[in-house]
Amino acid sequence: MTKIERDNFKVTLVLDRLRRAHNTGNIFRIAEALGADIAACGYTPCPPHPKLEKTAMGADRMVKCRHFETSLEAVETLRSEGYRMILAAEPGGNGAWEMEYEFPLVLVLGNEALGIAEDTLDSVDAIVSLPMLGEKASINVGNAAAAIMYAVAAKSGIVK
């Protein structure tokens, strides 16, 4: 297991066109719990937003959030700011517990119906996924964000 210092655990979650404030609020809570930032893209609800405020339970005021028109713009900006690894959460990628992570890290999460924008997928370093054993082979984006973020934190030695 790679062990990194807490100060070096820098992660930004790029939210690509998430429709529901409930999902976004859930992700704000995950981000706050692990000290991540958020880049809200397209029509993803971002602060200030009344429904987001309700579901984020205050995390929307605690998490650094920036808005970008597209997820590609967010990824390109973050890469220019020195982020070393940019991952997309999509089916068929490397298992979240099997990856070796480099920080600062970007994790792109997409719209449940549309996925991540194709041009953004073309620009990431790798795809990370969760094992799916059921027929549906899909889980809620907020649940996926939590599982992947805790896998990253555990693999990096931040949480046990």
Image (cartoon, helix red, strand yellow):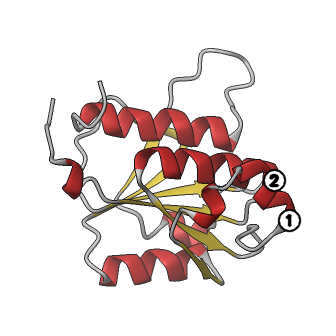
Q: Along the horizontal axis of the image, is 61 left or right of 149?
A: right
Does residue 116 show up? no
Q: Is residue 41 depicted above or below 128 in this figure?
A: below
Residue type highlighted by circle 2: Lys
Q: Position of residue 49 (x, y in %)?
A: 81, 69
Q: CA distance from mark 1 to mark 2?
A: 6 Å
Work out which quarter of the rendered image holds the C terminus and state it.
top left
How many residues crowd mark 2 within 10 Å: few (<14), some (14–19), many (20+)?
some
Q: Residues within 10 Å of mark 1 (few under 14, many from 20)?
A: few
Whether residue 52 is visible: yes
Q: Quadrant of residue 83?
A: bottom left
- Residue 72: where, in percent of width, then height? 53, 77
Q: Residue furthest right?
A: 51
Seen from the viewer's position, the closer of residues 127 and 106 is: 106
Tell me, yes or no, whether the two marked residues, 1 and 2, touch with CB atoms within 8 Å: yes
Which residue is denoted by mark 1 in the rendering? Answer: 50
In what element is the residue under mark 2? helix
Left or right: residue 23 compared with residue 69: right
* The label number, if any, that marks residue 54 in the structure image: 2
* 158 on left or right of 124: left
Q: Is residue 85 above or below residue 155?
A: below
Could you tell me residue 131's position as x and y percent?
51, 24
- Tell me the quarter of the image containing the N terminus: top left
